[in-house]
Image (cartoon, rainbow, N blue to C red):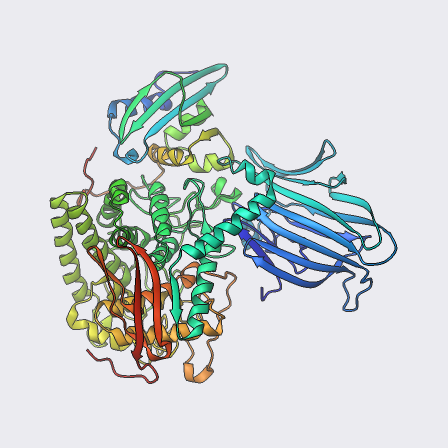
């Protein structure tokens, strides 16, 4: 079932490549994701420090632990499901610092008909 | 309590019952135990020997606890006054109820005491809209010691656990005590009702020992009042109003799960005990000179929830500040968009305004640095996402056409934005006050960029943009033949030309050309807008004017507090004092608790302010109103490390002292003496 190219893997690999993520500048801490696929548990450890991000496949202690079905996480990572609504429905387990969780869900895409974004002002210090 | 209901709460957990302490709710009936927008108990009825009880009196001890004195029998004549029943209830993780029965006779009594319990687990939205549930219910007795009521819909689970300290027989519909009380004796039990729901673990201690929790809340309220500045005043009603505001503001505090125990002002009690972008920001601004920590929590929490992507269902854009957050079933299943919902266009510029104002008072540069990304994203949103027409203004049109909000400004009812002749414009709409907020956000953002983020390029750009916006706005929104600012622009750029209180917010924002300010002030204090109590939302004579129309003629205290601030900003001190005097006079009629809105009738005509019927009281920004009026009357303004005091008070107030105002200066006192005669309507001077 686990394919290297699924939305989950892509999501974490892209995050790893990004190295810096300004949207999570305020989220200094570590997250452990335990993604369950039948009997197999896939682990990702994500650490943020002032927006700098490292992604690894290790286990280890974390400020925030999320345990979810991989199929569910695929849908979160692709923007098909909204993370907050899924949490309210109790579709996955989460423990630890809820503020960190709220910040993390910023990274999931949303659903929109039109990408109306125009690039004009660009007030952010770092872009892209 | 004027509806006969007794309400107690802590944050977003609250209990609404009748005067006996009983709850017997139908789906649409707004009584019950609620927490995180779910009803956890819809039935809680006490009987003694099969008989309902009658109420002798109710003590609202504090906002989080009440005591009910009862006797058997429900008629006007007491059937058996030989027994007294006392229910003392306080909110915790659910609620705690101490039930005491006193036997006043000289003979022992045997009694069957019964509590019927049940829950429909309705979402608040279902209670409002009378919708039917889609999940399944369970009720089970655990080890003979707990009754657990449950609700399940797919993975969504909520339950209520009921237990008692005295021996009881539990069944699926409640619990029964068979007791015997000695002559002149008493019997007591503690009942615990716990809500079980996902979320960060809450104080275990609180769960185990309700009495300690109660004591902690008592201390917390005491500290809140002790730490706030003190008001000394010749005019007693102002002291009453101030005290009422402080206690109500304490009750309105809400700790979102992400705020680590710190609180922000929720919008209203009890149905709006949640985070609202606009309400939390306006209330934080009003309370800033008194309790700056509310602003800090508001900025942090709203920053954490800031929009990060385009999402049509939630009307979310990157950088946008949320409108409303809810946690119930309908939100969970996306039958409502509040997870969170972003359909407000004023909250985002106001976020930057609050951040700057907060730093000016407190000197807390660290928070401004911590929220740099969020503030920049908010400024970015104004230009990149809010300008739907590409004309350099903030516009709104919902993308969620089913459950989103049509009017995304503070006057959010369907008919609030109209032409003089009463016609309603199409969408998108650009209401005037939004442009003022955007201007202010840019000016203040420039200061933060220059002084704290050390980004001169950004500061220069924002200042240039602000100046350009101000120039265009004073051209495009100015109604030449009326000499005021139009309420809005319609999609074709036409002026939606009704005269409304929004003009006062424009003064507050600073976007108004000096040359136009006098005419605007004259309108605000003129007979069409000013009722004698305050400035009406819509001017008398407009097509849709109605003195008891929600946003089309009533007087909103909160609106007036910002109008007064705006008048002061442009030097109209006496006029600001006049508005403050009217609203504070009205507060006296409401025993210090200003309602959300009251009728726009002429003061001379009714002699007292006619309350607009609303389900929510106290309302946060009405509670904050007296605080902001104190600020504007004393002319408090931080300048550098100092606080400037420049009083202009109505004579009726006499001597006013505000003691121990917190801020970057430590603690400071401010004094003023009433010299402005507001007894008669004067022409606006400068």
The N terminus of chain B sits in image quarter? bottom right
- Can residue B617 be seen here? The reply is yes
Report whether B224 appears left or right of B427: right
- x and y, in percent, of residue B177 in the image: 78, 44
Residue sitting at x 49%, y 71%? B590
x%, y% of residue B588?
46, 73
Which residue is depicted at the point 58% across and 67% down?
B2
Height in image: B609 above or below A98?
Answer: below
* Nearer to me, B401 or A84: A84
Between B61 and B439, the residue placed more toward the observer is B61
Residue B580, compared with residue A23, is above or below; it is below
Viewer can see residue B548: no
Q: Is residue B65 left or right of residue B422?
A: right
The image quadrant of residue A16 is: top left
- x, y percentage for residue B96? 63, 46
Q: Quadrant of the C terminus of chain B?
A: bottom left
> In the rendering, at what x and y percent does residue B461 appear?
13, 49
């Amino acid at each position: 079932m686990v394919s290297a190219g699924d939305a989950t893997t892509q999501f974490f690999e892209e995050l790893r490549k990004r190295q810096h993520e300004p949207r999570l500048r305020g989220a200094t801490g570590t997250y452990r994701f335990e993604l369950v696929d039948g009997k197999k548990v896939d682990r990702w450890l994500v650490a943020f420090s002032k927006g700098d991000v490292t992604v690894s496949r290790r286990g280890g202690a974390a400020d925030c632990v999320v345990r979810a079905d991989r199929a569910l996480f695929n849908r979160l990572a692709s923007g098909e499901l909204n993370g907050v609504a899924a949490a309210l429905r109790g579709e996955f387990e989460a423990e630890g610092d809820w503020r960190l969780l709220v910040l993390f869900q910023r990274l999931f895409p949303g659903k929109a008909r039109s990408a109306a974004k125009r690039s004009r002002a660009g007030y952010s210090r770092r872009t892209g | 309590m004027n509806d006969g209901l007794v309400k107690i709460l802590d944050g977003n957990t609250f209990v609404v019952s009748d005067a006996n302490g009983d709850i017997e709710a139908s789906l649409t009936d707004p009584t019950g135990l609620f927490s995180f927008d779910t009803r956890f108990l819809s039935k809680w009825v006490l009987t003694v020997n099969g008989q309902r009880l009658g109420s002798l009196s109710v003590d609202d001890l504090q906002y989080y606890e009440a005591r009910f004195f009862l006797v058997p029998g429900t008629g006007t004549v007491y059937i058996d006054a030989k027994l007294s029943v006392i229910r003392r209830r306080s909110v915790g993780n659910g609620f705690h109820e101490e039930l005491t029965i006193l036997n006043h006779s000289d003979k022992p009594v045997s009694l069957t005491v019964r509590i019927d319990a049940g829950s429909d687990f309705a979402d608040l939205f279902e209670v409002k809209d009378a919708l039917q549930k889609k999940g399944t219910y369970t009720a089970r007795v655990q080890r003979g010691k707990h009754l657990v009521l449950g609700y399940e819909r797919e993975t969504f689970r909520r339950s209520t656990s009921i237990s008692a300290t005295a021996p009881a027989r539990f069944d699926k519909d409640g619990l029964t005590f068979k007791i015997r009380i000695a002559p002149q004796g008493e019997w007591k039990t503690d009942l615990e009702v716990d809500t079980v729901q996902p979320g960060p673990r809450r104080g275990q201690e609180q769960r185990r020992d309700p009495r300690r929790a109660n004591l902690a809340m008592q201390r917390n309220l005491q500290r809140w009042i002790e730490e706030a500045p003190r008001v000394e005043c010749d005019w007693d009603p102002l002291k009453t109003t101030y005290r009422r505001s402080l206690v109500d503001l304490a009750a309105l505090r809400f700790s979102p799960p992400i705020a680590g125990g710190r609180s922000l002002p929720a919008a209203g009690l009890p149905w709006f005990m949640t985070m609202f972008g606009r309400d939390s920001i306006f209330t934080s601004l009003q309370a800033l000179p008194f309790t700056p920590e509310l602003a800090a929590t508001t900025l942090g929490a709203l920053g954490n929830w800031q929009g990060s992507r385009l999402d049509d269902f939630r009307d979310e854009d990157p950088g946008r500040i949320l409108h409303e957050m809810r946690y119930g079933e309908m939100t969970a299943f996306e039958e409502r968009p509040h997870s969170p919902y972003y359909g407000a266009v004023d909250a985002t510029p106001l976020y930057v305004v609050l951040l700057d104002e907060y730093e000016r008072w407190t000197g807390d540069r660290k928070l401004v640095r911590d929220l740099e990304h969020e503030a920049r994203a908010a400024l970015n949103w104004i230009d990149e996402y809010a300008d739907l027409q590409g004309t350099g203004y903030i516009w709104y049109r919902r993308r969620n056409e089913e459950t989103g909000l049509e009017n995304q400004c503070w006057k959010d009812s369907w008919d609030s934005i109209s032409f003089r002749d009463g016609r309603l414009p199409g969408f998108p709409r650009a209401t005037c006050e939004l442009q003022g907020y955007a201007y202010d956000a840019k000016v203040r953002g420039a200061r933060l960029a220059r002084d704290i983020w050390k980004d001169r390029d950004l500061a220069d750009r924002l200042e240039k943009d602000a100046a350009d916006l101000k120039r265009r706005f004073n051209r495009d929104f100015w109604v030449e033949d009326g000499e005021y600012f139009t309420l809005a622009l319609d999609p074709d750029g036409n002026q939606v030309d009704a005269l409304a209180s929004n003009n006062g917010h424009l003064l507050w924002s600073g976007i108004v050309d000096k040359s136009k300010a006098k005419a605007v002030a004259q309108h605000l204090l003129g007979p069409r807008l000013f009722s004698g109590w305050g400035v009406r939302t819509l001017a008398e004579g407009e097509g849709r004017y109605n003195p008891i129309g929600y946003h089309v003629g009533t007087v909103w205290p909160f609106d007036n507090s910002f109008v007064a601030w705006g008048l002061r900003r442009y030097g109209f001190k006496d006029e600001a004092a006049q508005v403050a005097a009217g609203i504070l006079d009205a507060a006296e009629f409401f025993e210090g608790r200003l309602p959300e809105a009251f009728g726009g009738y002429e003061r001379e005509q009714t002699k007292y302010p006619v309350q607009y019927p609303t389900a929510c009281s106290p309302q946060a920004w009405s509670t904050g109103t007296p605080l902001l009026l104190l600020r504007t009357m004393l002319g408090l303004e931080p300048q550098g490390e100092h606080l400037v005091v420049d009083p202009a008070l109505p004579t009726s107030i006499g001597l006013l002292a505000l003691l121990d105002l917190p801020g970057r200066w430590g603690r400071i006192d401010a004094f003023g003496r009433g010299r402005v005669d507001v007894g008669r309507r004067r022409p606006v001077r400068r």
